[in-house]
Image (cartoon, rainbow, N blue to C red):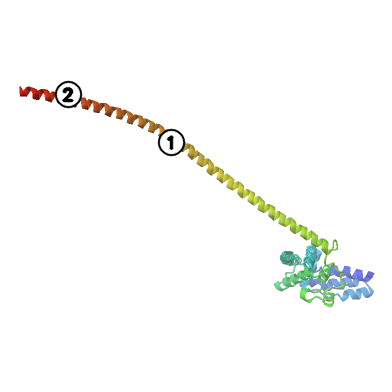
Amino acid sequence: MSDDDARLDEIAVALYAEPPASFTASRNARAAEVSGSLATRVKRLRKPTVAAWAVNLLVRDGQLGEAVELSAALHEAQDDLDAAELARLGKQRRALVSALARRAAELAAEAGTTLSPAMTEAVEHTVNAAVVDAAAAAAVLTGRLVTTIEAGALDGDALGAAVAGGAPDAVPAAPARDDLAARRARKAAERAVREAERAQAEADRTVSSAESHLTTAREHADRVHERVAALRAELARVEKDAAAADGEVERREADRVEAQRSAREAAKTLERAVAARDEGDDR
């Protein structure tokens, strides 16, 4: 890159962070500060759309780094054919893109411009394109967008036209820190850890349930033993009462026998008295 190219990109980055309403005046002022072909190139810089300017503000705010990292993670999951990870990352992507679009609207409002719903949607589409495509990410991260971009309409010409100044440097689609086999081994290890954690959690729940059941069984056993003790005490009292009743029966039986003996004696006495009376009448 020549000195003029580097200087043009530097000027463009500053200009495309200014509100579109003041862009033309600022651009002409900057062109007047330089000379030669550089001045001509500065004057040719096109005024950005409001939505593209809001994305440039987002870049200057440092909010797009996480989106680029997510893009790399998505490519890893696609390479690994990891459906579960793709689903998780897809949900994360949608939440992140929506949050970044809201942040862009906040930055624009702080700069005195309100984004319409259509503009906010264009910002969201551009951020999403940066997440799913490395070339789009490189274009967006220049901070020199002239127009917004769509993930479904990405080609070299479209990206080149969307960026003011020099062509963007490529952003790697996936990290180079390890190869596919190493990533798969790491993911397999992570899955094994998750499965072990689930097994541990299930084992902990089983232990907790067993302890709860044991406590309940012990409480029930204690109540039964208390009942047994109470019944034994009651049985002892009843057996004592039964022995007393048996003694009373024996005493009453003896009284009956004595009464019968007395009755027999009285009958004999009566018999003798009657006999004596009858004998006296005969004489």
Disc 1 from disc 2: Cα separation: 51 Å
Q: In the rendered image of this protein, does residue 265 appear above or below residue 138?
A: above
- The residue type indicated by label 2 comes to Thr
- Give the crowd class for mark 2: few <14, some 14-19, many >=20 residues within 10 Å: few
- Towards the viewer: 20 or 135: 135
Residue positioned 15% across, 24% down in the render: 272
Q: Is residue 150 visible?
A: no
- Towards the viewer: 216 or 168: 216
Q: What is the x, y in percent for residue 98?
A: 72, 67
Residue positioned 91% across, 76% down in the render: 40
Q: Mark 2 points at which residue?
A: 269
Front: mark 1 or 2:
2
Q: In which quarter of the image is residue 72?
A: bottom right
Q: Which residue lies furthest to the bottom in this view?
A: 157
Q: Can residue 181 be seen in this view?
A: yes
Q: Name the residue under label 1.
A: 235
Q: In which quarter of the image is residue 274?
A: top left
Q: Describe the element under mark 2 as helix, strand or loop.
A: helix
- The residue type indicated by label 1 comes to Leu
